[in-house]
Amino acid sequence: MVSEKEVQQETTEELNQDAAVESEETAETETAVEENWQQKAEEAEDKYLRLRAEFDNYRRRIQKENETLQKYRAQNVVTGILPALDNFERALNIETTNDESASLLKGMQMVHSSLLEALKAEGVEMIESVGQQFDPNLHQAVMQVSEEGTESNTVIEELQKGYKLKDRVIRPSMVKVNE
């Protein structure tokens, strides 16, 4: 027969084994939960870093766009003024026959000069054409002639002035080019 002490000892051993198994299961569960939280924390940190990088890129892009807008803010106004400037230049080429027309011409020259200075202050420059090599980025060839003593692909005559705003061509020069 089995004594009561032996039964008690077996029961205690069984309880200890059950407790050890439960303890192992609890430790495994805690480890799994801890790993799950660790993974979620890493995912959240990765998501945060990506979002921050996207925001930094967005901020830089907006800043660059604003700088470009500020740099070329006068482009629409300048484009609208260029035809009037062309008309001024045509009017200044008229021969004067009397003192009244000479004084009128003098006033027009003053207005023309002040208009050019205002445009220059905004960063508008005339494109030099005559005698230069033809550049399709700066010139628009409307005629091609054959002239002796001039290099091939050289601008011979400027038919309409071209203008740049800072480094951007607003209107290319209309030119006559040697073949």
Image: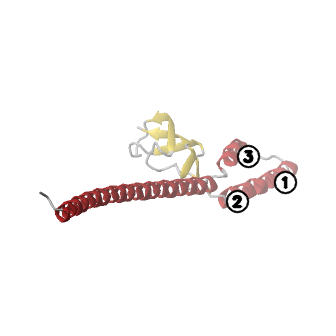
Of circles 2 and 1, the one toward us is 2
The residue located at (51%, 39%) in the rendering is 140
According to the picture, the residue beneath numbered tag 1 turns out to be 103
Q: Nearer the viewer, residue 58 or 123?
A: 58
As measured in the structure, the alpha-carbon distance from the residue carrying label 2 to the one carrying label 1 is 21 Å
Residue 176, x across and y down, in percent: 51, 39
Q: Residue furthest left?
A: 1
Q: Where on the picture, by quarter, is residue 15? A: bottom left
- Identify the secondary structure beneath mark 2: helix
According to the picture, the residue beneath numbered tag 3 turns out to be 88
* Residue 51 seen: yes
**Structural crowding at the residue carrying mark 3, measured as other residues with C-alpha within 10 Å and reported as few (<14), some (14–19) or many (≥20):** some
40 versus 158 height, above or below: below
28 versus 83 height, above or below: below
As measured in the structure, the alpha-carbon distance from the residue carrying label 3 to the one carrying label 1 is 15 Å
Residue type marked 1:
Ser
Residue 92, x across and y down, in percent: 73, 48
The residue located at (20%, 62%) in the rendering is 4
The residue located at (14%, 58%) in the rendering is 2
Of circles 2 and 3, the one toward us is 2
Residue type marked 3:
Phe
- 171 with respect to 31 (left or right): right
**Structural crowding at the residue carrying mark 2, measured as other residues with C-alpha within 10 Å and reported as few (<14), some (14–19) or many (≥20):** few
Residue 51, x across and y down, in percent: 48, 54
- Identify the secondary structure beneath mark 1: helix
- Location of the C terminus by quadrant is top left
| Mark closer to the chain start, 2 or 1 | 1
Residue 117: mark in rendering: 2
| Mark closer to the chain start, 2 or 3 | 3
- Identify the secondary structure beneath mark 3: helix
Tell me if label 2 and label 1 are in contact, CB under 8 Å: no
